[in-house]
Amino acid sequence: MPVMEMKVIPLGTPTASVSEFLVPVVRILKQEQDFKYHITSMGTIIEGPSLETLYVLAAKIHQAVLVHADRVVVFLEVDERKDKVLSMDGKVRSLEEKARAQ
C-alpha cells in the first residue's frame, strides 16, 4: 500500500493558530474507511489502497480546508514500493528494530 504524508497550510487566516481550520481534515479522515492515518504535530501520514485513492483524498481535504481559509498550500510526499507490502507501521517498526540491533 502506498503511504502519503500530507501537510496542509491554511493561509490568510485571522490568527496565527490554524488548528480550527484543520478540523475538516480530521472529520474527513474519520469518515473514510479505506484509509489508515496518523496525525502528527506537523502533518498527517495516510496509508491507502492505491495511489489514485490517496490523490482523490488529498484533493477532498484541500477543498474542505479552502472553504474556511483564503488560501491553502498542500505538500504531499508519497512512498510506494513494488517489491514488498508497505505500511506506515511497518516502516516505523523496521527502523526501531534496526536501532535496537545496534
Image (cartoon, grey):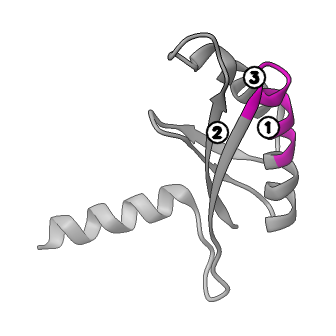
Distance of label 3 from label 2 (alpha carbons): 11 Å
Q: Residue 24 placed where, x, y %?
A: 76, 23
Q: Nearer the viewer, residue 45 or 16?
A: 16
Label 3 neighbour load within 10 Å: few <14, some 14-19, many 20+:
some
* Mark 1, residue position: 61
* Mark 2, residue position: 8
Q: Residue 58 placed where, x, y %?
A: 78, 48
Q: Main secondary structure of the magenta part?
A: helix
| Residue type, numbered disc 1 | Ile
Please give the label number shown on residue 69. 3
Q: Are marks 1 and 2 in contact (CB under 8 Å)?
A: yes
Q: Is residue 19 left or right of residue 101?
A: right
Report the residue at 74% width, 56% height from top.
48
Report the residue at 28% width, 61% height from top.
96
Label 2 neighbour load within 10 Å: few <14, some 14-19, many 20+:
many
Quarter of image, res 53: bottom right
Give the structural element (helix, strand or loop) at label 2: strand
| Residue type, numbered disc 3 | Ala
Give the structural element (helix, strand or loop) at label 3: loop
Distance of label 1 from label 2 (alpha carbons): 9 Å
**Can residue 30 be seen in the rendering of this structure?**
no
Q: Nearer the viewer, residue 12 or 83?
A: 12
- Residue 64 drawn in magenta: yes
Quarter of image, res 101: bottom left
Quadrant where the N terminus sits is bottom right
Distance of label 3 from label 1 (alpha carbons): 13 Å
Q: Is residue 87 left or right of residue 48?
A: left
Q: Which of the two discs, 1 and 2, labels the residue nearer the N terminus?
A: 2
For the record, the magenta segment spans 59-71
Quarter of image, res 76: bottom right
Q: Which of the two discs, 3 and 1, labels the residue nearer the N terminus?
A: 1
